[in-house]
Image: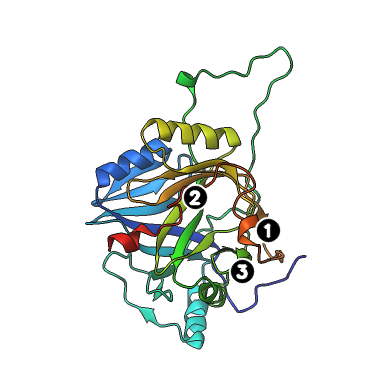
Amino acid sequence: MAISESAGGPAIHSLDHFCLTVPDLDEARTFFTEFGLDVRAANGTLELYTFGHPHRWAVLRPGGRKKLEYITFGVFKGDLDRFREKFAALGVETIDTPANGEPGGIWFRNPDGLPMQVIEAEKCSPDTKAEFLTRSVGPGECAAIPRSKAPRVRPRRLSHFLLFTSDVMRDIAFYERTLGLKLSDRSADAVAFLHGVHGSDHHLLALGGSTGPGMHHSSWDVGSIQEVGVGGAHMASLGYDKGWGVGQHVLGANYFQYVPDPWGSYAEYSCDIDFVPAGFDWPAADHPPEDSMFLWGPPPPENFIANTELQDA
C-alpha cells in the first residue's frame, strides 16, 4: 500500500556513517581491507569506503578500547531547520559537537546517551532493490573455480547497522518520532528493524536488546550468495572464523555471513535483503523469537548477542 508522505514531519533518508574507536588502527586496516573495503588514512583516522562508490561509510579512531562513538544520519538539503523545529517541539535536547564528532548539522543524544547527528547529505541508501546475481552454466559446461583463484569480494555499500539498546520498545518510538523511521518488523522486545520512508532496505537501523548502547554489527551489501560464502571463507582462512553463517534470515530475508572483528563485534556480508520503496506502507509485525531469527543455516554462537562494549568498560 502506498502512502503519500511520512507522518510526523521530516524524516532522514540514510544512515550516513558511523564512528568507532578501536584499540589498534593497523589491526583495523588489516581486517577491513581483507573484508573487501577501501580503507583510507585521513588525519590520524581510518575511513571506510567501498570500491567504486564515492561515499564514506565509517570513521575509525584510535583509542584504548573499542567503542561506538556516534552515528550520523543524512537528510535532504533544506531539512535541517525543519528538524530543529521538530526536535524543539518534541523536547529533544541538542548538544555541542562531541570531542570525536565532526562539526555541522544537529547533534543530540539517543535515550542511552549515545551521540547522534543529522546532516544535509546526498542520499546513500538505495532507491531500488539491490541487484541480486546468480552464476550458472549450461549442460556440458564447467562452472568450477579453483579455490586458489577465488575472486576477492568487494561489498557495494553499507546496508545497515545493529545498535544495542537498553530498551528496544522505547527506542522504536524514539526513532519514529525524532528521525521519521518506521518499524519494519520486530521480535518481542529483543530486536527491531527500522526502515527509511524515502526508500531503503528492510532495515537501515536495527535495535538489539542489551543493558546499554554499543555496536553489534555493520552489514555490507554484496551481489550474490556466492560472494557471501567466498567472503566468509576468505576471512575464516585468516583466522576470523568464529562468526555465524552462511544462512538466510527470516526478517529481511537476506543471506548472511557474520565475520567476527578483532574487538567482539561483527561485519556482515549480506545480499538480497527485502526493500521498502519510498512511501510504501510496510506491514510491520511482531514475530515469535523461535520463528524469526533465521530460516536456514547453522545455529548462532552462544555469545553472538553479547555487548562487549559494556563488558570491557
Label 3 near label 2: C-beta < 8 Å?
Answer: no
Which residue does the numbered mark 3 point to in the structure image? 182
In the rendering, at what x and y percent does residue 282 appear? 70, 64
In the rendering, at what x and y percent does residue 97 appear? 32, 72
Whichever of labels 3 and 1 marks the residue nearer the N terminus, that label is 3
Label 1 near label 3: C-beta < 8 Å?
Answer: no
Which mark identifies residue 219? Answer: 2
Q: How many marks?
A: 3
Q: Is residue 309 left or right of 216 when viewed as pictured? A: left
Q: Is residue 8 left or right of 15 when viewed as pictured? A: right
Q: Residues within 10 Å of mark 1 (few under 14, many from 20)?
A: many
Quadrant of the rendering where the C terminus is positioned: bottom left
The answer to which quarter of the image holds residue 240 is top left
Front-most of residues 231 and 212: 212
Q: Hey, what amino acid is under mark 2?
A: Ser
Label 2 near label 1: C-beta < 8 Å?
Answer: no
In the rendering, at what x and y percent does residue 104 appear? 37, 69
Front-most of residues 188 and 231: 188
- Write the residue at 55% across / 74% down: 169
Q: CA distance from mark 2 to mark 3?
A: 19 Å
Which residue does the numbered mark 1 point to in the structure image? 277
